[in-house]
Image (spheres, grey):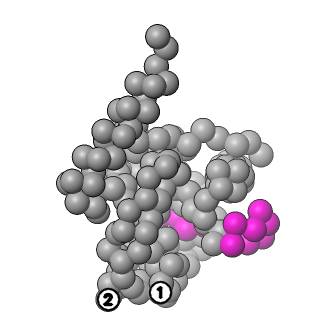
Amino acid sequence: MAIRKVLTYPDPFLRQVAEPVTRFGESLDALIRDMAETMWDEPGIGLAAPQVGVGLRLFVYDMEVSGDPAKVRVVCNPEFTLMEGSQVDEEGCLSVPGFTADVKRAARVVMRGQDRAGKPVELDVAGLHARLLQHETDHLDGKLFIDHISALKRGILKRRLRKAQAAQAPA
C-alpha cells in the first residue's frame, strides 16, 4: 500500500470528468487500498480517484475514519436515482485544504453503483452520508464543493490561495 499525493485546487485534472470503471480485479483493489491509506493519512472521510490523479469513476469512504480496511466502502460508477429535500452544512475538501463553506445539498439520496468486485450496490441514505456521496460524486464529474458557493466566497478563496502560493514560491 502507498500513500498517494492528493491534487489540490486549481490543478486542472480535478476539472476532468472521470471515465467509467470497466476492469475489476487486483489492480483496482491496489488502487482502492492506496486511496484508503491516503484518505486516512490526510485525514478525511472520503476520497475520489480523480483527487489522486486517476480518471476513474470511483470513490472510497470511511465515515468513522477508522483506519480499518474492513470498514472502507467503495462505490464505482455511481448514479443517483433519487435526490430529495435539502440540507445546508459546512463542507471541506482534501483538494481545497484550509477552506470550508456552507453548501446546500439534497437531504436524502438513493445511489446505484458497483462495489470493488463489480457487483451492484444501492445506497439509500440521508444526512452526512448523503452529503458525502454527493461531494465525492461531484469529483467524478469535475466539480468541487466551491462550485456550490457564492461568487464572493469563491473570490475570497482564490485570493487566499494566490497569497499562499506566492508565499511558498522561491525568492
Q: Position of residue 48 (x, y in %)?
A: 52, 56
Query: Alpha carbon of mark 1 to alpha carbon of mark 2: how far?
Result: 10 Å
State which quadrant residue 86 falls in.
bottom left
Secondary structure at badge 1 equals strand
Q: Position of residue 125 (x, y in %)?
A: 50, 86
Among numbered discs 1 and 2, the one appearing first in the sequence = 2
- Assess whether residue 35 is covered by the magenta stretch: no
Residue on which the image places disc 2? 85
18 and 65: which is toward the camera: 65
Using the image, determine if residue 13 lies above or below residue 118. above
113 and 16: which is toward the camera: 16
Residue type, mark 1 in image = Ala
Number of the label disc, if any, that sits on residue 37: none
Residue on which the image places disc 1? 126
Span shown in magenta = 64-77
- Kindly tell me whether residue 22 is visible in this rendering: no
Q: Residue at x 36, y 68 (%)?
A: 102
- Kindly tell me whether residue 93 is visible in this rendering: yes
The reply to whether callout 1 and callout 2 are in contact (CB within 8 Å) is: yes
Using the image, determine if residue 98 lies above or below residue 105. above
- Assess whether residue 65 is covered by the magenta stretch: yes
Q: Residue at x 33, y 56 (%)?
A: 146
- Other residues around mark 2 within 10 Å, as few (<14) / some (14–19) / many (≥20): few
156 and 116: which is toward the camera: 156
State which quadrant residue 64 falls in.
bottom right
- Other residues around mark 1 within 10 Å, as few (<14) / some (14–19) / many (≥20): some
Secondary structure at badge 2 equals loop
Using the image, determine if residue 104 lies above or below residue 43. below
